Image (cartoon, grey):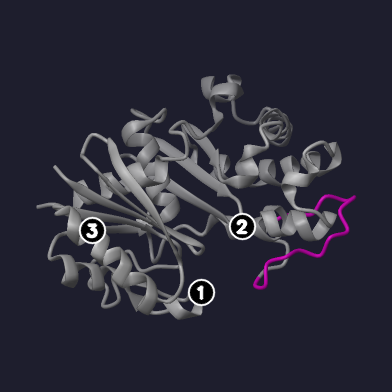
Amino acid sequence: MILGALEAGGTKMVCAIGDENGNIFEQVSIPTETPEITMPKMISYFKEKGIEALGIGCFGPIDPDPDSDTYGYITSTPKLAWANYNIVGAFRDALECPVGFDTDVNGSVLGEVTFGQAKGKKCVVYVTIGTGVGAGIYIEGRLLHGMLHPEAGHILMKKRADDTYGGKCPYHKTCMEGLAAGPAIEERWGKKAIELKDNQAVWDLEAYYIAQALANYILILSPDMIILGGGVMHQEQLFPLIRKYVTEMLNGYIKTEELADMDHYIVPASLHDDQGIMGCLELARRSMP
């Protein structure tokens, strides 16, 4: 099969060609401007490749419900030029092929369970921590949807006693994204995360908030594996700190083989930052009749 994949981000659109086995043959990056500027470039790219189906993992919020009148739309996004935009319909009309559609983070978790380290797992949570925080959730063969899709980056957090920062999220201030995303790190400490690599206090506090969120996900979803990706998680010194804090926060309440082996339970992404594109290839495959 010749499949198209689109990892649609707020800054860039990564377009790729691959197959049903997760092989990526080529990819290009197109800046995310307005639909009027960006869509013709992407449509032209995919048209030239003769794809049989397209999978889209998209920034959100989106409407992923096939029974909804606004299925395939980017909905109430702060990227105002893309608000209420029918991205699936635009591609389907132009390319005349099936289109699979989900959030970017659901695309990433699908890539990991289909082609990566999470194969065979019943429940997997993939959390991306970068400019924002999002989570993709896979449960027993399906990506989790409900009335919309998970917005687990906005769970409300308990601030640590020594943290005087007011929070960055315009909606909730001190939700996970408001306390732990890249812009919150920069505003709290006055420097970009990459410039703070050797500041132990930065990463201890960051690990505390990530661990608090993960402890809640563990208690609610009981995942077999938690995968952490995104730009902030390139700070690999975070992983042992997060595992330590999760263990302390759960305080022995849950006893499983997975939690006894934290090094293989809370893990970095395994597909060299291609998990999102590979998940989109699988979304394309699943969209075919």
Can residue 143 be seen by looking at this rendering? no
Point out the image quarter for the N terminus.
top left
- Left or right, residue 198 beside residue 155: right
Can residue 175 be seen by looking at this rendering? yes
Separation of disc 2 and disc 1 at Cα?
13 Å
Point 68% across, 67% down: residue = 169
Q: Closer to the observer: label 1 or label 3?
A: 3
Q: Amino acid at mark 1?
A: Lys
**Bounds of the magenta segment:** 157-171
Residue ID for mark 1: 79
Q: Amino acid at mark 2?
A: Thr
Point 9% across, 52% down: residue = 289
Mark 2 Cα within 10 Å, few/some/many (few <14, many 20+)? some
Q: Secondary structure at mark 1?
A: loop
In the figure, 16 relative to 184: above or below?
Answer: above
In the image as oriented, which residue stretches furthest toward the left?
289
Q: Closer to the observer: label 2 or label 3?
A: 3
Q: Position of residue 116 (x, y in %)?
A: 38, 30
Please identify the dominant SS of the magenta region.
Answer: loop
Q: Position of residue 65 (x, y in %)?
A: 29, 65
Separation of disc 2 and disc 3 at Cα?
28 Å
- Mark number displayed over residue 125: none
Point 59% across, 22% down: residue = 263
Residue ID for mark 3: 46
Q: Secondary structure at mark 2?
A: loop
Q: Secondary structure at mark 3?
A: helix
Residue ID for mark 2: 131
In the figure, 262 relative to 176: above or below?
Answer: above
Q: Amino acid at mark 3?
A: Phe
- Left or right, residue 277 beside residue 21: right
Q: Nearer the viewer, residue 199 or 28?
A: 28
- Left or right, residue 223 beside residue 102: right
